[in-house]
Amino acid sequence: MDGSSTGIQEPLDLIRLSLSERVFVKLRGDREMTGILHAYDGHMNLILSDVEEKIMIVNEGEQATVSVAKRKMDMLFVRGDGVILVSPPSRT
């Protein structure tokens, strides 16, 4: 499959096809977010709106526990050097 029928020639084309759609972003530091992708560049700097961020917090001790902190933001600039993964919406 060469991807020519879907307009995918290189990896960033997947991101381009996800503009104005909700994407999943995994960041360093056990952070994840979903939001509507408005812009990106070759460094994977992202501009997202309607963002929900989840941060996994590991409390080490005698009994280690994991808690999840959530927050919502109207608009967010994500610096590309912290981006591990960007997942486009599923296309079924």
Image: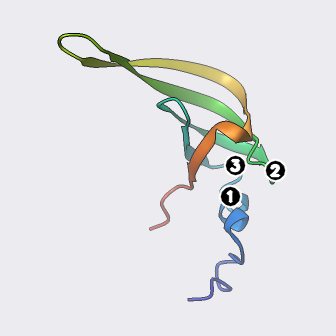
> Closer to us: mark 2 or mark 3?
2
Sequence order check, earlier mark of 2 and 1: 1
Q: Give the Cα separation between the discs numbered 2 and 3.
A: 15 Å
Q: Quadrant of residue 16?
A: bottom right
Callout 1 amino acid: Ile
- Please indicate whether residue 56 sits to the left or right of residue 71 in the image: left
Sequence order check, earlier mark of 3 and 1: 1
Q: Give the Cα separation between the discs numbered 3 and 1.
A: 10 Å
What residue is drawn where x is 76% and y is 42%?
45
Measured from the top left, where is residue 62 in percent x and y?
Answer: 18, 10
Measured from the top left, where is residue 85 in percent x and y?
Answer: 56, 49
For the N terminus, the image quarter is bottom right
What is the number of the mark on residue 84? none
Q: Which residue in the protein does label 3 denote?
A: 20
What residue is drawn where x is 63% and y is 49%?
21
Callout 2 amino acid: Asp
Mark 1 falls on what kind of element? helix
Mark 3 falls on what kind of element? loop
Q: Which residue in the protein does label 2 denote?
A: 41
Measured from the top left, where is residue 19 in percent x and y?
Answer: 71, 53
Mark 2 and mark 1 in contact? Answer it, CB < 8 Å.
Answer: no
Q: Residues within 10 Å of mark 2 (few under 14, many from 20)?
A: few
Q: Give the Cα separation between the discs numbered 2 and 1.
A: 10 Å
- Front residue of 60/83: it is 60
Q: Which residue in the protein does label 1 denote?
A: 15
Callout 3 amino acid: Ser
What residue is drawn where x is 30% and y is 14%?
60
